[in-house]
C-alpha cells in the first residue's frame, strides 16, 4: 500500500537512538524527508547519515526539547533545510533517570522535586514545546499530523514509574484536547502507546537480539505479551515506525484524538 508520504517533511524528536531512530528510518523509507532531533548532536547526525546512505533524505538537528527557544530555532532550521514540518513525532522521553551511572527504579515517596521536574520537563513539556513550535505553520497551511509516543505506563500506570506515568498520561490528555481544537484545520493529533521495546538503549537490562530459548528474562517477559509469545520477541522499533507511518499518512485522515497501542497485547483496554 502506498501511504502517500513521499516528499513530506517530518521532525522526530529524540531520534538519535532507540524507538525514535526506528521511526525516523521507517518514515525515510516511505519517502519522507526526516529531521532527526537529539539532545546529542553526534547521535542526530549519525542517524541522518545512515538514512542518507540508504537513499533517503535527512538532516540531523540538535536541540533540548525542554527549551522552547531551542526548539523554535530548530524548527526554523528545518524549514530552511527541508521545508515546513508536515509531521511531528514527539518521541523524546525516558522512563528512568540515570543517576551515578545506574538505572534507578524510584518509589514515589522516596523521590524529590528535582526528580519530578526532570521527568515532567522532558516527557511532558518537551511535547508541548515541539507541538507549539510547529502548530502555527500547520494551521496556516491547513494540514498536519502530530503523533506523540507515550507508553502503557501513561494509560494504566506503572509501579516505580509514577511520575513518568503521570507525564505520559498528560501527553495523552493534551493530545485529545488539542485534537478537538485543531481538527477544523485538518490537523490530526494522535498517540501511540508502546510496551516493552528492544533497542540499543536497553542493552544494560536486556539483550535486544536475544531469543526466548537463550534468555530467561525474555521468556518471563513474554508471558505478558500474547502475540510476543507467538513471534518469540518483544516489540521492535520498526513496530513503532509502521504505526507512526500509518497515522502520518492520508490513509488515517479520519483518525484523531486516539491512542494506538503497539504493545503485543500487554494491555487490551
Image (cartoon, helix red, strand yellow):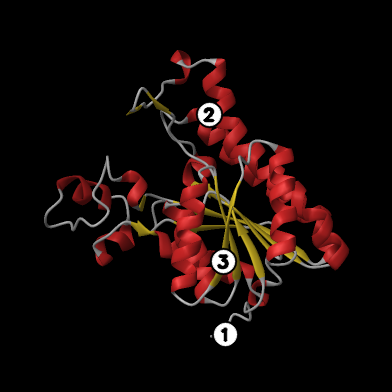
- Between label 2 and label 3, give the one nearer the viewer: 3
Where does the image place residue 142, in percent across and percent down from the top left? Answer: 84, 67
Where does the image place residue 230, in percent across and percent down from the top left? Answer: 26, 66
Q: Nearer the viewer, residue 141 or 266?
A: 141
The reply, left or right, for residue 230 in relation to residue 166 is left
Residue 58 bears which disc, if any? 3
Cβ–Cβ below 8 Å for labels 2 and 1? no
Which residue has dot 2 on it? 163
Where does the image place residue 117, in percent across and percent down from the top left? Answer: 59, 24
Label 2 element class: helix
The structure residue drawn at horizontal position 62% and vertical position 32%, both measured from the top left corner, is 121
Local crowd at mark 2 within 10 Å, few (<14), some, or many (≥20)? Answer: many
- Residue 39, located in which quarter of the rendered image? top right
Mark 2 or mark 1: name the one nearer the start of the chain.
1
- Between label 2 and label 1, give the one nearer the viewer: 1
Q: From this viewpoint, is residue 256 visible? A: no
Which residue has dot 1 on it? 2
125 up-or-down from 145: above or below = above
The reply, left or right, for residue 118 in relation to residue 70 is left
Mark 1 or mark 3: name the one nearer the start of the chain.
1
2 up-or-down from 28: above or below = below
Where does the image place residue 243, in percent across and percent down from the top left? Answer: 52, 66
- Between label 1 and label 3, give the one nearer the viewer: 3
Amino acid at each position: 500500500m502506498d501511504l502517500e508520504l513521499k516528499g513530506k517533511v517530518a521532525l522526530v524528536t529524540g531520534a538519535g537512538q532507540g524507538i525514535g531512530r526506528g521511526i525516523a528510518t521507517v518514515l525515510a523509507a516511505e519517502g519522507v524527508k526526516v529531521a532527526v532531533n537529539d539532545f546529542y548532536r553526534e547521535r542526530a547526525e549519525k542517524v541522518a547519515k545512515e538514512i542518507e546512505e540508504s537513499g533517503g533524505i535527512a538532516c540531523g538537528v540538535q536541540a533540548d526539547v525542554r527549551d522552547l527557544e531551542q526548539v523554535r530555532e530548530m524548527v526554523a532550521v528545518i524549514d530552511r533545510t527541508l521545508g515546513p514540518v508536515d509531521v511531528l513525532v514527539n518521541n523524546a522521553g525516558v522512563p528512568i533517570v540515570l543517576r551515578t551511572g545506574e538505572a534507578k527504579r524510584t518509589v514515589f515517596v522516596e523521590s524529590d522535586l528535582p526528580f519530578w521536574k526532570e521527568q515532567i520537563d522532558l516527557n511532558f513539556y518537551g511535547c508541548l514545546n515541539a507541538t507549539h513550535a510547529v502548530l502555527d505553520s500547520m494551521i496556516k497551511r491547513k494540514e498536519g499530523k502530530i503523533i506523540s509516543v507515550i507508553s502503557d505506563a501513561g494509560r494504566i500506570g506503572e509501579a516505580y514509574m509514577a511520575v513518568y506515568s503521570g507525564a505520559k498520561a498528560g501527553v495523552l490528555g493534551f493530545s485529545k484536547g488539542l485534537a478537538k481544537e485543531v481538527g477544523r484545520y485538518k490537523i490530526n493529533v494522535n498517540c501511540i502507546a508502546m510496551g516493552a521495546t528492544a533497542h540499543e538503549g536497553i542493552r544494560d537490562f536486556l539483550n535486544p537480539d536475544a531469543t526466548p530459548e537463550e534468555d530467561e528474562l525474555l521468556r518471563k517477559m513474554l508471558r505478558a505479551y500474547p502475540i510476543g509469545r507467538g513471534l518469540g520477541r518483544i516489540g521492535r522499533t520498526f513496530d513503532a515506525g509502521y504505526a507512526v507511518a500509518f497515522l502520518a499518512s492520508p490513509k488515517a485522515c479520519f483518525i484523531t484524538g486516539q491512542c494506538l497501542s503497539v504493545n503485543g497485547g500487554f494491555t487490551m483496554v
